[in-house]
Image: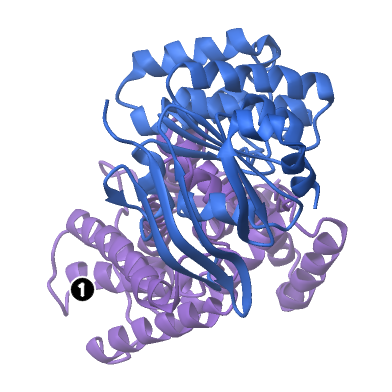
Chain colours: A blue, B purple
Amino acid sequence: MADHDIHISHLDVRYGPVRAINDVSADVPEGKITAIIGPNGAGKSTLMRTIAGLRAVSQNVSGSITWGDRSILNDSAYKIARDGLMLVPEGRRLFPGLSVEENLLLGGYRRRNDGDAVRAAMDEVMEMFPVLGARRNQAAGTLSGGEQQMVAVGRAIVSGAGTWLLDEPSLGLAPIITHQLFEVIGQVARSGRTILLVEQYAESAIGLADQVLVLVSGQLVWSGSGEDARSDGRVAELAWG
Amino acid sequence: MTDLSQILVTTLKEGSLLALLAVAFSVVFATTRLVNLATGAVSLAAAYGLLWITGPDWLGGPAWLGVIVALIIGVLASVAVYYAAIVPFGRFDPTSNIGWILTTFAAGLILIEIAGIWFENRSLPVEPVLSSVFGWTGFNLSGTPVRVSELMLVVSTALVIGVLVWTERHSLSGRLFQAVAQDSDAASLQGINPRMVVVRSFVIAGVCAAVAAINMAPAVGVNQTTFQLVGFKALTAALIGGLGSIRGGALGGFALGLFVAVLRVTHNQNLEDPLLFAALLAILAIRPQGILGRVAEEKA
């Protein structure tokens, strides 16, 4: 199998004088679920956006991020996504004026020349989330939060990407929908994809993860296996701040 | 009846020009959140292209060649404005580029000056591109004469805008356009290159500006002031219809056309400008995003 680990080394991210990420080094191994947990404002989203290549104008970045054997620190977001590293961003970021189907289709943009695969993946999504089938032609902006998150995850499924970054997928969702979503994430992980998952709800993320990283005030304060995190009550505590 | 038909014809005539240019403003605004104040200048550049090819004092070439050259110059000038006045001033970021409005205005002025020097600042008449079809020069609509050139204006406008509206809804390019317009960052997270879509929007704006120029130049001559004025009026139309929406631009253009037509037929031309801006203020007070405009989505 090709090496698609993400290696983060001495990463610093600053907004003007404010340090959002402070000397973070971590490995995200291929084919595993890595969870990043931590309190609000710990820099989790900044880390995800930096890996995905989304950078604010006022942002300064140093250190290195490699994906496989390629440095992606200075790549544009669209190139990183095109090559199969997909960020499902915080707040879902659907195209509100486009229909559910069009949103999913755009998720498949990176492999638009493989129509069969895109169609098969669309069917898979509709099967996974039957409610989306019924709302196929509805504008994505009119969906409930849970349905929107399903479209956001569905977009990543249709993309066929091998590496997923999920930023707070459970934010604002009812517990039952969160549960359903985590089941799908587990399913995706078992299919051999690499997943980096950010969550404020530490327990459910720790329950799913092979590896756990705890980020507090931009610094990595704990890292270890999912098992260690589950047995060490301190970890969830750290995440609550 | 004459009044009614006169209003209809004038609305279609004035409305077509305004709609084309309003769509040019809207398409660029949709992908860049930027009011491209060089739109009138781009149109003027295309008009100079038509004059250069067809003018008896210049190359004296055939009208069809003039049309093609005008379209090419319109597209090149429009894309040049993007690369000269927007790209150098920072990373593409729709939320922080308000100041770039003035750079597009400056680029437009430079474009006009260059053309002015080359064409020695003369206001120059241009031959109609189409004055008859197999000898047929036009018809009478209940006492209002309609010339073939006017018919060409309305038909070419309907064609351009019709194709754009259809493409926006039913093609991959249209979906990419909407995706970048609605959330540029989210589009790049799907592997879409936003800059490619932005450049395409400048190409479309260039085509719209050129089609307007091809129809307008024979009627008013290649005249800097007129083109700039029509440009600003079209911006008003785009604001009324909803800046950023193709259909909004078209609607705003024809609404303004109707407004101008009624004032003209009732001999109230002198009220045109004050009433126009009063109407703009009234509409924006009720619907700040324009009639068909969408409220910008803010991150929750």
* Residue bearing the label numbered 1: B52
Chain holding disc 1: B
Residue B270 in the image, given as x and y percentages of width and height:
73, 79
Residue B282 sits in which quadrant? Answer: bottom right
Residue A45 in the image, given as x and y percentages of width and height:
62, 51
Q: Is residue A205 above or below residue B192?
A: above
| Observer able to see residue A120 | yes
Residue A9 sits in which quadrant? Answer: bottom left
Which class describes the residues within 10 Å of circle 1: few (<14), some (14-19), or many (20+)? many
- The answer to which of A37 and B182 lies nearer the viewer is A37
Quadrant where the N terminus of chain B sits is top right
Residue B62 in the image, given as x and y percentages of width and height:
16, 59
Residue A73 in the image, given as x and y percentages of width and height:
39, 58
User: Is residue B278 toward the left or the right of residue B40 in the image?
Assistant: right
User: Is residue A141 toward the left or the right of residue B192 in the image?
Assistant: right
| Observer able to see residue A102 | no
- The answer to which of B98 and B121 lies nearer the viewer is B98
Residue in view at x 51 percent, y 67 percent? A12
Residue in view at x 62 percent, y 80 percent? A17
Q: How many marks?
A: 1
Q: Secondary structure at mark 1?
A: helix
Q: Is residue A174 above or below residue B187?
A: above
Residue in view at x 27 percent, y 63 percent? B70
- The answer to which of B42 and B173 lies nearer the viewer is B173
Check disc 1 and give the amino acid type.
Answer: Trp
